Image (cartoon, rainbow, N blue to C red):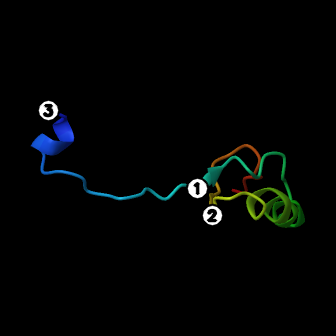
Amino acid sequence: MPIYRLLGGKVRVHVNLYANGWFAGAKQPEAFEEKANTELLRSTLGQGKIDQLSDSIPHRV
């Protein structure tokens, strides 16, 4: 018997996915906008994540 049945059955019918890394190479706000328009909106996922600790984003202290 599958473990999910032992735990009470299915919990979700579907899982939402998001794009990650779509902003690679973008350093300025305009570049992020261009990447979002070309990479993220063109994907079938429709949502994305930005890693604020990425080396692609300049850090200001």
Give the CA separation, mark 3 to mark 1. Answer: 32 Å
Q: Is residue 56 left or right of residue 4?
A: right
- Depth check, front residue: 24 or 4: 4
Q: Amino acid at mark 3?
A: Met
Q: Position of residue 57 (x, y in %)?
A: 75, 52
Report if residue 32 is visible in the image: yes
Mark closer to the observer (3, 1): 3
Report if residue 51 is visible in the image: no
Which image quadrant is residue 18 in? bottom right
Q: Position of residue 16 (x, y in %)?
A: 49, 59
Question: SS at mark 3?
Answer: loop
Q: Is residue 4 left or right of residue 47?
A: left
Q: Which mark is residue 57?
A: none
The residue that appears at 63% across and 59% down in the rendered structure is 45
Mark closer to the observer (2, 3): 3
- Depth check, front residue: 30 or 41: 41
Is tag 2's residue or tag 3's residue first in the polypeptide sequence? 3
Is 15 drawn above or below residue 46 in the view shown? above
**Label 1 crowd (10 A; few <14 / some 14-19 / many >=20):** few
Read off the residue under disc 2.
47
Read off the residue under disc 1.
18
Read off the residue under disc 3.
1
Q: Is residue 36 left or right of residue 50?
A: right
User: Contact, CB < 8 Å: mark 2 with mark 1?
Assistant: yes
Is 2 drawn above or below residue 13 in the view shown? above
Which image quadrant is residue 11 in? bottom left
Quadrant of the frame with the N terminus: top left
Q: Amino acid at mark 2?
A: Gln
Is tag 3's residue or tag 1's residue first in the polypeptide sequence? 3
Question: SS at mark 2?
Answer: loop
